[in-house]
Image (tube, rainbow, N blue to C red):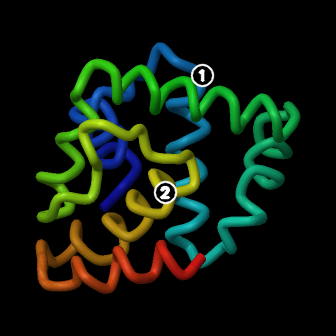
Amino acid sequence: MNNKELCNTLIYIGITPDRKGFSYLVQAALLVKSTMMLKDVFRQVSINFNTNQHTIDSSIRNAIQSAFHSRKLLRLNEKLGMEIIDKDNCPTTKAIIYYLAHYLNTLAPENDLSYGKSLQGNLLMQ
Protein backbone atom coordinates (compact mmCIF):
# COMPACT_ATOMS: atom_id res chain seq x y z
CA MET A 1 0.00 0.00 0.00
CA ASN A 2 1.38 3.39 -0.88
CA ASN A 3 0.99 6.79 0.75
CA LYS A 4 -2.03 7.73 -1.40
CA GLU A 5 -3.88 4.54 -0.48
CA LEU A 6 -3.10 5.08 3.20
CA CYS A 7 -4.48 8.62 2.97
CA ASN A 8 -7.63 7.33 1.27
CA THR A 9 -8.05 4.72 4.02
CA LEU A 10 -7.70 7.38 6.72
CA ILE A 11 -10.29 9.55 5.01
CA TYR A 12 -12.60 6.53 4.72
CA ILE A 13 -12.37 5.89 8.48
CA GLY A 14 -13.07 9.56 9.26
CA ILE A 15 -9.59 10.96 9.84
CA THR A 16 -9.51 13.92 7.50
CA PRO A 17 -6.58 15.89 6.05
CA ASP A 18 -7.77 19.16 7.56
CA ARG A 19 -6.52 17.96 10.96
CA LYS A 20 -2.85 18.20 11.90
CA GLY A 21 -3.02 14.67 13.22
CA PHE A 22 -3.72 13.34 9.73
CA SER A 23 -0.19 14.00 8.42
CA TYR A 24 1.37 12.87 11.68
CA LEU A 25 -0.64 9.64 11.61
CA VAL A 26 0.32 8.91 8.00
CA GLN A 27 3.98 9.25 8.83
CA ALA A 28 3.67 7.32 12.11
CA ALA A 29 1.96 4.36 10.40
CA LEU A 30 4.55 4.33 7.61
CA LEU A 31 7.40 4.42 10.14
CA VAL A 32 5.96 1.51 12.13
CA LYS A 33 5.35 -0.34 8.86
CA SER A 34 9.03 0.05 8.03
CA THR A 35 9.89 -1.75 11.30
CA MET A 36 10.48 1.27 13.51
CA MET A 37 9.63 0.50 17.11
CA LEU A 38 6.37 2.10 18.17
CA LYS A 39 8.05 3.72 21.16
CA ASP A 40 10.37 5.71 18.84
CA VAL A 41 7.71 6.92 16.43
CA PHE A 42 6.59 10.15 18.14
CA ARG A 43 10.19 11.26 18.52
CA GLN A 44 10.95 10.67 14.83
CA VAL A 45 7.71 12.28 13.62
CA SER A 46 8.38 15.31 15.86
CA ILE A 47 11.84 15.65 14.30
CA ASN A 48 10.44 15.34 10.78
CA PHE A 49 7.76 17.98 11.42
CA ASN A 50 9.95 20.20 13.61
CA THR A 51 7.59 20.10 16.58
CA ASN A 52 7.46 18.32 19.95
CA GLN A 53 6.26 14.83 20.82
CA HIS A 54 3.36 16.11 22.91
CA THR A 55 1.99 18.01 19.90
CA ILE A 56 2.25 14.89 17.75
CA ASP A 57 0.49 12.70 20.31
CA SER A 58 -2.21 15.28 21.04
CA SER A 59 -2.94 15.98 17.37
CA ILE A 60 -3.20 12.31 16.47
CA ARG A 61 -5.38 11.63 19.51
CA ASN A 62 -7.67 14.53 18.54
CA ALA A 63 -8.06 13.20 14.99
CA ILE A 64 -8.82 9.69 16.28
CA GLN A 65 -11.38 10.96 18.80
CA SER A 66 -13.12 13.03 16.12
CA ALA A 67 -13.37 9.99 13.84
CA PHE A 68 -14.54 7.85 16.77
CA HIS A 69 -17.31 10.27 17.71
CA SER A 70 -18.49 10.43 14.10
CA ARG A 71 -18.64 6.58 14.19
CA LYS A 72 -16.59 6.43 10.95
CA LEU A 73 -13.64 4.93 12.82
CA LEU A 74 -15.71 1.75 13.09
CA ARG A 75 -15.05 1.31 9.37
CA LEU A 76 -11.55 0.18 10.31
CA ASN A 77 -13.19 -3.08 11.43
CA GLU A 78 -14.21 -3.62 7.81
CA LYS A 79 -10.69 -2.88 6.59
CA LEU A 80 -9.15 -5.23 9.16
CA GLY A 81 -11.75 -7.92 8.54
CA MET A 82 -12.63 -8.23 12.22
CA GLU A 83 -14.24 -6.37 15.11
CA ILE A 84 -11.23 -4.62 16.60
CA ILE A 85 -12.70 -1.16 17.22
CA ASP A 86 -15.35 -1.16 19.96
CA LYS A 87 -18.25 1.23 19.40
CA ASP A 88 -18.21 2.23 23.08
CA ASN A 89 -14.49 2.75 23.70
CA CYS A 90 -12.22 5.03 21.72
CA PRO A 91 -8.99 3.23 20.83
CA THR A 92 -5.64 4.63 21.91
CA THR A 93 -3.26 6.41 19.59
CA LYS A 94 -0.85 3.50 19.96
CA ALA A 95 -3.54 1.01 18.96
CA ILE A 96 -4.56 2.92 15.82
CA ILE A 97 -0.95 3.33 14.68
CA TYR A 98 -0.36 -0.37 15.30
CA TYR A 99 -3.53 -1.42 13.45
CA LEU A 100 -2.73 0.80 10.47
CA ALA A 101 0.84 -0.47 10.27
CA HIS A 102 -0.35 -4.08 10.35
CA TYR A 103 -2.98 -3.26 7.76
CA LEU A 104 -0.26 -1.80 5.56
CA ASN A 105 2.08 -4.76 6.08
CA THR A 106 -0.34 -7.63 6.08
CA LEU A 107 -3.79 -6.93 4.74
CA ALA A 108 -3.39 -4.35 2.03
CA PRO A 109 -0.91 -6.16 -0.23
CA GLU A 110 -2.59 -9.55 -0.09
CA ASN A 111 -6.09 -8.91 1.23
CA ASP A 112 -5.55 -11.85 3.57
CA LEU A 113 -7.96 -11.69 6.50
CA SER A 114 -6.66 -14.79 8.26
CA TYR A 115 -4.24 -13.10 10.63
CA GLY A 116 -6.83 -11.31 12.80
CA LYS A 117 -6.30 -13.28 16.00
CA SER A 118 -2.55 -12.69 15.97
CA LEU A 119 -3.12 -8.95 15.49
CA GLN A 120 -5.24 -8.76 18.64
CA GLY A 121 -2.81 -10.92 20.59
CA ASN A 122 0.23 -8.86 19.56
CA LEU A 123 -1.37 -5.60 20.65
CA LEU A 124 -2.29 -7.02 24.03
CA MET A 125 1.29 -8.14 24.57
CA GLN A 126 2.73 -4.63 24.10
Q: Dot 1, crowdedness within 10 Å: few (<14), some or many (≥20)?
A: some
- Pick out the residue farthest to the top: 18
Query: Exactly how many numbered labels are in the figure?
Result: 2
Which residue is painted at 15% across and 78% down in the image?
110
Residue 95: mark in rendering? 2
Q: Residues within 10 Å of mark 2 (few under 14, many from 20)?
A: some
Residue pictured at 61% horizontal, 38% vertical: 24
Q: Are marks 2 and 1 in contact (CB under 8 Å)?
A: no
Q: Secondary structure at mark 1?
A: helix
**In the picture shown, does residue 10 fall above or below 80?**
above
**Between 4 and 70, the one nearer to me in the picture:** 70
Give how far across and how far down residue 115 sits, in percent.
22, 84
Residue nearest the viewer, comparing 3 with 25: 25
Q: Quadrant of the N terminus?
A: bottom left
Give the residue drawn at x 77%, y 64%.
Answer: 40
**Is 94 drawn above or below residue 70 in the view shown?**
below
Q: Measuring from the top left, give residue 52's x and y in whole percent.
A: 87, 35
Rendered position, 31 above or below 106: above
- Dot placed on the residue nearer the N-terminal end, 2 or 1: 1
Q: Residue furthest front?
A: 88
| Residue 73, percent from left and from top | 28, 36
Instruction: Give the residue type at disc 2.
Output: Ala
Res 15 quadrant in image? top left
Q: Quadrant of residue 126?
A: bottom right
Q: Nearer the viewer, mark 2 or mark 1?
A: 2
In the rendered structure, which amino acid carries the disc numbered 1? Lys
Image coordinates of residue 112 in percent, x first then y, are 12, 79
Q: Residue at x 60, y 22 (%)?
A: 20
> Considering the numbered disc 2 on the image, is that residue within a helix, a strand or a loop?
helix
Task: Give the residue pinned by disc 1.
Answer: 20
Q: Which mark is residue 56?
A: none
